[in-house]
Image (cartoon, coloured by chain):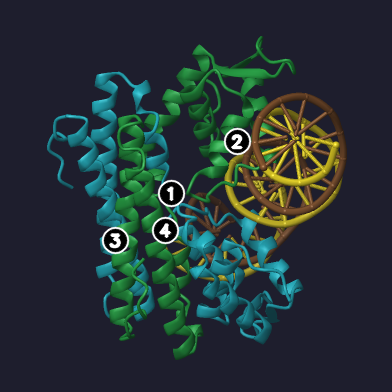
Chain colours: A green, B cyan, C brown, D yellow
DNA sequence: ATGGCCATGTAAGATGTTACATGATTTA
DNA sequence: TAAATCATGTAACATCTTACATGGCCAT
């Protein structure tokens, strides 16, 4: 029984699967551009990670005939598909389901440290940043309505749902703290 | 200008602040019991982390007079309060606001790997696990309505909002994939 | 007195980031 | 042709987990 894939390994292997045959750079670039900043997609993580996957027989690389530099093109092996499947279905496990985190929420516990003025400013700026983030995720959703596959659309929909919930939550926080509304800025 | 606190450093320092004077174990234990599984609160992370904070002058320890073992009690220094404040207000920065992650959503991109039967099962089990998680977060919210401080209540409210959004999202996913409703099990 | 929890810690390993280095290709 | 971007990689470092070790306290 092969070792379980970590979160980033699962995502990276899945990206190889979706784009195969593709270069390592394609995987890295998509992670780098992703609106979520959970992973930076730094070269120091992705290239070693993909090599590990190849050593474990989950990915195989073949030289690109049409490329003078002889760059390697990656593809997922049969064992890789199995590992990816196992990683996906593990998503229903309580540990995985509960492994969400929100750095804004983490900070909320400690707002008593702030003066009234700093508190007002913090809530207003965070609300604005959250709304901006919501706009970005919405654009990701609608910007590729027909082109993308339905699963990508549904995943993006989840990001929008969560972003909306976070905005509503922060509005509730502002009301509970009896602070004024954010000045203008309905972007 | 001191180095910024990492996420776990901020949370740990905040917990020391809330409970001070307290032992390292109290911090570790609260992280371990926390419903979010982002961090395990393992001893291998917490004890070295708190020592680092002490070396940086953000935390100070004094021996507990009333304890035969001479255990150390931790407290946040003035510099520690400043660092914690800076960490909190950084929560409005776009990078931090966008640093949310949902391991279920990550997996959704790759559901095409599953057979129809496996897909149905996955959605049903994940929906059930998500509802269970929502129940747990709700209990955290109502189980301590009066006792807890208002900020903890508001933070827990955020967890509930997000969990509700995730449940609604997965219901939408199920409908979009034209799958049947989860069999029974309204726990 | 002993088994279980309280409390603290270390060592080894996995994994991610930053910063740097390199060369090829495309674009202005 | 110069600058930007594509593409790949390494080294040093930071941080987190797992697994193990240790010793005190407390209830039966």
Reading the image, the residue beneath label 1 is A99
Left or right: B49, with B160 as reference point: right
Q: Is residue B104 above or below residue A162?
A: above
The answer for how far apart the CA atoms under marks 2 and 1 are is 23 Å
Determine whether label 2 and label 3 are within 8 Å by CB.
Answer: no
Which label was assigned to residue A133? Answer: 4
Name the front one of labels 2 and 3: 2
Q: Secondary structure at mark 3?
A: helix
Direction bottom: furthest residue:
A116
For label 3, the residue is: B160
Identify the subunit bearing mark 4.
A
Q: Earlier in the sequence, mark 2 or mark 1?
A: 2
Residue under the point 15% across and 41% down: B185
**Who is closer to the viewer here, B48 or C22?**
C22
Instruction: Give the alpha-carbon distance from disc 4 to disc 1, as whole Å.
Output: 21 Å
Residue nearest the observer in this picture, B160 or A186: A186
Q: Is residue D26 above or below residue A44?
A: below
Q: Number of numbered discs present?
A: 4
**Which mark, residue A28?**
2
On whether disc 4 and disc 3 are found on a single subunit, the reply is no
Position in image of residue A126 (x %, y %):
43, 71
Q: Are the residues flagged by discs 3 and 1 in contact, CB closer than 8 Å?
A: no
Q: For this view, does B58 lie left or right of residue B36?
A: right
Which chain is home to disc 1?
A: A
Q: CA distance from mark 4 to mark 3?
A: 20 Å
Report the residue at 22% width, 48% height from top. B168
| Mark 4 or 1, nearer chain start | 1
Which of the chains bears the disc numbered 3? B
Say which label, 2 or 4, has the lower sequence index.
Answer: 2
């Amino acid at each position: 029984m092969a070792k379980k894939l970590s979160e980033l390994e699962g995502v990276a292997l899945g990206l190889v699967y979706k784009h195969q045959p593709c270069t390592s750079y394609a995987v890295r670039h998509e992670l780098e551009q992703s609106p979520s900043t959970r992973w930076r997609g730094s070269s120091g993580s992705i290239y070693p990670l993909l090599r590990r996957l190849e050593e474990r027989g989950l990915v195989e690389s073949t030289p690109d005939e049409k490329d003078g530099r002889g760059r390697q093109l990656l593809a997922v092996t049969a064992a890789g598909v199995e590992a990816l499947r196992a990683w996906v279905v593990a998503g229903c496990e309580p540990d995985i389901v509960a492994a969400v985190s929100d750095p804004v929420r983490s900070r909320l516990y400690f707002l008593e440290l702030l003066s009234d003025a700093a508190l007002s400013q913090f809530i207003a700026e965070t609300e604005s940043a959250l709304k901006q983030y919501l706009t970005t995720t919405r654009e990701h959703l609608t910007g590729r309505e027909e082109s993308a596959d339905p699963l990508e659309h549904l995943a993006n929909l989840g990001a929008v749902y969560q972003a909306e919930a976070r905005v509503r939550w922060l509005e509730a926080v502002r009301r509970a703290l009896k602070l004024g509304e954010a000045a203008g800025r309905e972007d």
